[in-house]
Image: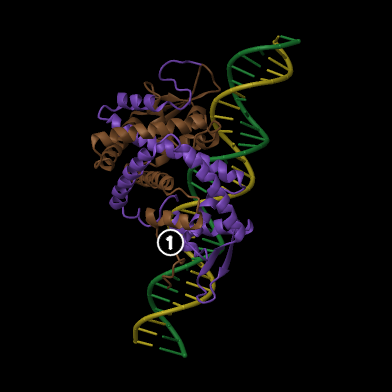
Chain colours: A brown, B purple, C green, D yellow
Amino acid sequence: MGDTPGTSTGTEPTLEEQIAAYQREFQDLDPQVEQIVSALSRLNRRMNVAYGRQTAALGITNADWEVLKALVLSGAPYRMGPSDLAKRLGLTPAAMTHRIDRMVAEGLVTRERDESNRVRVIVELTPAGREKWLEAMRLATVFEGDLLQDLSPAERTALGEVLIRLLRRVEHAQPDAGGRLSDLD
Amino acid sequence: MGDTPGTSTGTEPTLEEQIAAYQREFQDLDPQVEQIVSALSRLNRRMNVAYGRQTAALGITNADWEVLKALVLSGAPYRMGPSDLAKRLGLTPAAMTHRIDRMVAEGLVTRERDESNRVRVIVELTPAGREKWLEAMRLATVFEGDLLQDLSPAERTALGEVLIRLLRRVEHAQPDAGGRLSDLD
DNA sequence: GATGTACTCTTCAGCGTCGAAATTTAGCTT
DNA sequence: AAGCTAAATTTCGACGCTGAAGAGTACATC
């Protein structure tokens, strides 16, 4: 089997290799910019893998976790309508219906019609659902602390500040992606 | 419609609101860590939305673009086998078969049996596919430059360095996510 | 030289999501 | 009060991905 350059075996190249390859194919590339952007992508991908493992260990899916997060974030009685949830999670209402079906079956949320406005439906977190969220949160914070372990307090502050600056720029530039967002934090 | 606290309308909270809400529900939260992690998530989400718009403007999908990137990264003759591509993109071989079907129909790649080893299939980038990649790259670099516009050279260097450090930590900790990766940079 | 074994790719059934149509209810207009 | 319009949710058909089973090819061993 050829180790000839140009015959990739499917293994992921290191970031440096990748940037070098892009530069060969596209001279205008700014390696500095590419390094930041690619590292952001890869970092996020790894984080999602880690979160996926954690939710799996708790017997739920990442999809479930997103819904739990949205409900907890909504505060006190932990209630939201399906379409609000859908907007929040970047799903169509149709997809939301099925997700809620599953989660009701799993006992994480309840679904009931709003008696004061019978068009609406109220999705409410169950105590079991809240407990799952809490467990997931505990695992997540352990992982996150571990991830940032090597950063000094000053570096953390600086990093947080720079990221917020980038975020502000991009959120201001694309006011809301047309209404639905694609993922949840 | 109640503006009662606790009755979310589905709009995304600001990062500050979100962190405050999490702190209310989970006292052990380190706001510093949470800020970094959440900003990373949101940033990545926005970036993906932006890339999605760009590929759509070019008449391809993000899925197509991922394949094009992998092939270009593989270098000179721009050839890879389906299973290598699948590993690289974090898909099952089954999904890869269908993606290649589509992309062959779109004229972005060709598929042929390897005559020297008839079990294998060779997917090769067409000139049209390479041109699409180039167009996407041009759009992407404009967006990326814009994103990092406000950062001084020193800040860019520092950010790149810190991100690489984080990446190294997480890539070392989870050697390869069990073989398949979930996304491409 | 035949058979077994490993590998690559494709096919198939199931699930989640999307886009659009259908259903149900609320509020407004005449 | 009847009908019309708008809004929230569910249902339906299509598509992409997964996991598992199936088909074809190469290599090794006997």
User: What residue appears at the point 31 percent right and 23 percent down from the top-left corner?
Assistant: B24
Q: Is residue A114 above or below residue B81?
A: above
Q: How many labels sit on residues?
A: 1
Direction from residue B2 to residue D29 in the image, left or right: left
| Residue lying farthest to the front in this orientation | B153
At a point 42% along the width and 64% down the height, the residue shown is: A9
Q: Which residue is mark 1?
A: A10
Specify the amino acid type for callout 1.
Gly
- Badge 1: few (under 14), some or many (20 or more) residues near its Cα, within 10 Å? some
Q: Nearer the viewer, residue B51 or A178?
A: B51
Q: Secondary structure at mark 1?
A: loop
- Vertical arrangement, residue B163 with respect to residue D10, above or below: below
Instruction: Where is residue D11? Give x, y as percent.
Output: 59, 37
Q: Is residue B28 left or right of residue B100?
A: left
Q: Nearer the viewer, residue A79 or A138?
A: A138
| Residue B82 image point, x, y percent | 50, 62
Q: What x and y, as percent, mark residue B76?
A: 50, 64
- Residue A125 visible in the shown view: no
